Image (spheres, grey):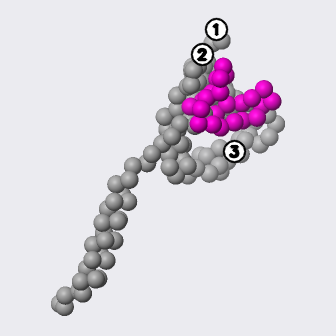
Amino acid sequence: MPALPTRSRLMIRALALLLIASACVPAFAQKVYQWKDAQGVTHYSDSPPPNQQAKDRRIDNRGEPVVQATAAGKSVENPQCATAKLNLQLLAGKNAVQQDTDGDGKPDKTLGDDDRANQRELATAAVKAYCKPAA
């Protein structure tokens, strides 16, 4: 097997080193605060608003939200509570509600009246279980 010219070997080594170095770069996350003003407009900032509740969001360098979310100043609502309340609100509306029954992430079944009532009961139970009573 003939030896590769020196320039080709250096190029291959440089590319391999670059590939290894790029795989070692950690995903840096920065804090982003989210809040709504008096008019209901959602704002995002790198510093929390004064005297107002804000959600602390962590975003990585690809723009993806980081799973961890903590409150800035005041406690943030339990995520299961928020989901249960949203489900209850959707089920109380008049619009058709679809459900993913096969687990592929896409809705494939429109809920009928009985299914909708059953899901409403489950959402009500979840609200009772996950949401703290108002103080």
- Residue kind at label 2, given as amino acid type: Lys
Distance from label 1 to label 3 (Cα)? 35 Å
Closer to the chain start, of discs 1 and 3, is 3
Residue drawn at x 81%, y 30% is: 39
Residue drawn at x 39%, y 49% is: 26
Q: Position of residue 16 (x, y in %)?
A: 30, 69
Q: Residues within 10 Å of mark 1 (few under 14, many from 20)?
A: few
Question: Where is residue 126, by image quadrant?
Answer: top right
Q: Can you say which quadrant of the picture contains the N terminus?
A: bottom left
Contact check, label 2 and label 1, Cβ < 8 Å: yes
Q: Secondary structure at mark 1?
A: loop
**In magenta stretch: residue 67:** no
Kindly identify which residue carries mark 2: 132
Q: In the image, 46: left or right of 22?
A: right
- Residue kind at label 3, given as amino acid type: Gln
1 vs 3, front mark: 1
Magenta part of the chain: 34-56
Figure check: 45 above or below 84: below
Q: Which mark is residue 135?
A: 1
Q: Secondary structure at mark 3?
A: strand
Can I make out residue 28 in this image?
Answer: yes
2 vs 1, front mark: 1
Q: Which mark is residue 98?
A: 3
